[in-house]
Image: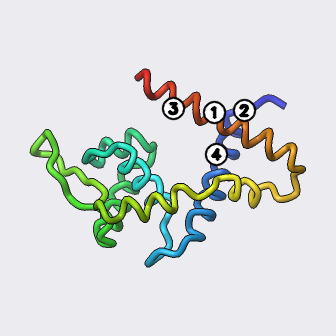
């Protein structure tokens, strides 16, 4: 079998759902959506206010969904409007008191999600897959650092 774009998208979607299900196992006032998780994680990583356009570009989430997620996060009190270098642009950042709680969710051991995604796979196979995903993650990080 060759890894086709369709296969890759299928795997990415399954991983996203497994990660989301694992993240939402932690109790918050209302369950986090996958979009909320992605936006919060991105904003925490950036450490500076970001506009919706910047969030769209970095996360690959469509503009309309980012707008919905940002409104939801504002309503929850998890993010706040922040000054942006371009005064015409609205930017947001994660509130300080939320960062620690968000990191508790984002730092959940990802192997738990992998275990739930492929519970019948032998431990050796799961280990190989986890090692491969970790290598992919590090390679993507390196690429992003050189951009």
Q: Residue at x 75, y 61 (%)?
A: 116
**Mark whose residue sits in front, 4 or 2:** 4
Q: Name the residue tied to disc 2.
A: 4
Can you tell which mark lies on residue 12?
4
Residue 119, horizontal then vertical, whole percent: 83, 59
Q: Please state which of residues 82 and 67 is positioned toward the viewer in this rendering.
A: 82
Q: Earlier in the sequence, mark 1 or mark 4?
A: 4
Answer few, some or many: residues within 10 Å of disc 1's Cα (few below 14, many 20 plus, some between 14 and 19). Answer: few
SS for callout 2: loop
Answer few, some or many: residues within 10 Å of disc 3's Cα (few below 14, many 20 plus, some between 14 and 19). Answer: few
Alpha carbon distance from label 3 to label 4: 17 Å
Q: Earlier in the sequence, mark 2 or mark 3?
A: 2
Examine the rendered structure and indicate whether residue 133 appears above or below residue 100: above
Q: Residue at x 25, y 47 (%)?
A: 49
Q: Earlier in the sequence, mark 4 or mark 2?
A: 2
Residue 51, horizontal then vertical, whole percent: 26, 47
């Amino acid at each position: 079998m060759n890894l086709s774009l369709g296969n890759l998208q299928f795997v990415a979607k399954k991983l996203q759902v497994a990660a989301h299900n694992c993240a939402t196992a932690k109790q918050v006032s209302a369950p986090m959506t996958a979009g909320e998780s992605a936006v919060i994680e991105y904003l925490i990583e950036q450490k500076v206010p970001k506009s919706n356009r910047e969030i769209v570009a970095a996360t690959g989430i469509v503009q309309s969904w980012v707008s919905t997620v940002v409104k939801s996060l504002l309503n929850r009190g998890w993010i706040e409007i922040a000054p942006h270098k371009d005064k015409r642009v609205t930017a947001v950042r994660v509130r300080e008191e939320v960062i620690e709680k968000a990191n508790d969710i984002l730092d959940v051991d990802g192997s738990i999600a992998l275990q739930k995604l492929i519970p019948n796979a032998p431990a050796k196979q799961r280990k190989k897959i986890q090692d491969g995903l970790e290598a992919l993650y590090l390679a993507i990080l390196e690429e992003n650092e050189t951009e």
